[in-house]
Image (tube, rainbow, N blue to C red):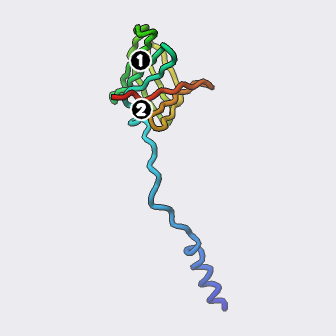
């Protein structure tokens, strides 16, 4: 009887140990997904942002069809923290991408951008 119990004590941990699912969920590569053009339209105001793969970008603000502002910037991304350097300032945001929607948040404010077509 002792041998059976000892054998069970040795085998039981192996039987109860679960094998992990070999199909790990692919992690979202935010950096690759971020690259490209994004637009936010609110009434007659449009903000267009382009993130280039060389960590440069452009932002454009259009009001009533007239370009009101245009700036170039550099960017970096670590996890979901986006850092933008523009006009001597460093801006820090958190981002998420769900399909064709980029959400950029700062403190408790967030803005959604749609992936630009084309």
| Element marked by disc 1 | strand
Residue drawn at the location 44% of the way across and 34% of the way down: 100
- Tag shown at residue 84: none
The answer to whether mark 1 and mark 2 are in CB contact below 8 A is no
Residue drawn at the location 48% of the way across and 20% of the way down: 41
Mark 1 to mark 2 CA distance (whole Å): 14 Å
Residue drawn at the location 65% of the way across and 85% of the way down: 5
Relative to 86, is 1 above or below? below
Viewer-proximal residue, 79 or 45?
45
Viewer-proximal residue, 44 or 56?
44
- In the rendered structure, the answer to whether residue 94 lies left or right of residue 66 reads right
Viewer-proximal residue, 6 or 23?
23
Q: Residues within 10 Å of mark 2 (few under 14, many from 20)?
A: many
Q: Position of residue 118 (x, y in %)?
A: 33, 28
Q: Position of residue 66 (x, y in %)?
A: 41, 8
Q: Position of residue 20 (x, y in %)?
A: 51, 62
| Element marked by disc 2 | helix
Residue drawn at the location 45% of the way across and 31% of the way down: 77
Relative to 42, is 98 above or below? below
Q: Quadrant of the N terminus?
A: bottom right
Q: Residues within 10 Å of mark 1 (few under 14, many from 20)?
A: some
- Judging by the rendered image, the residue that carries numbered circle 1 is 59
Of label 1 and label 2, which has the lower sequence position? Answer: 2
Relative to 65, is 24 above or below? below
Q: Position of residue 115 (x, y in %)?
A: 42, 30
- Judging by the rendered image, the residue that carries numbered circle 2 is 34
Residue at the right extreme, as displayed: 1
- In the rendered structure, the answer to whether residue 118 lies left or right of residue 62 reads left
């Amino acid at each position: 009887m002792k041998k059976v119990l000892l054998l069970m004590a040795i085998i039981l941990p192996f039987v109860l140990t679960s094998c992990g699912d070999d199909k790990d969920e692919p992690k979202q590569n935010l950096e690759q997904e971020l690259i490209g053009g994004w637009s936010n339209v609110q009434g007659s105001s449009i903000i267009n942002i382009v993130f280039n793969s060389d960590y440069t970008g452009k932002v454009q603000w259009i009001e009533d069809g007239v370009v009101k502002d245009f700036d170039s910037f550099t960017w970096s991304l670590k996890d979901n923290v986006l850092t933008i350097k523009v006009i001597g300032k460093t801006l820090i945001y958190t981002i998420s991408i769900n399909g064709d929607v980029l959400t950029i948040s700062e403190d408790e404010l967030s803005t959604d951008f749609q992936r630009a077509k084309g």
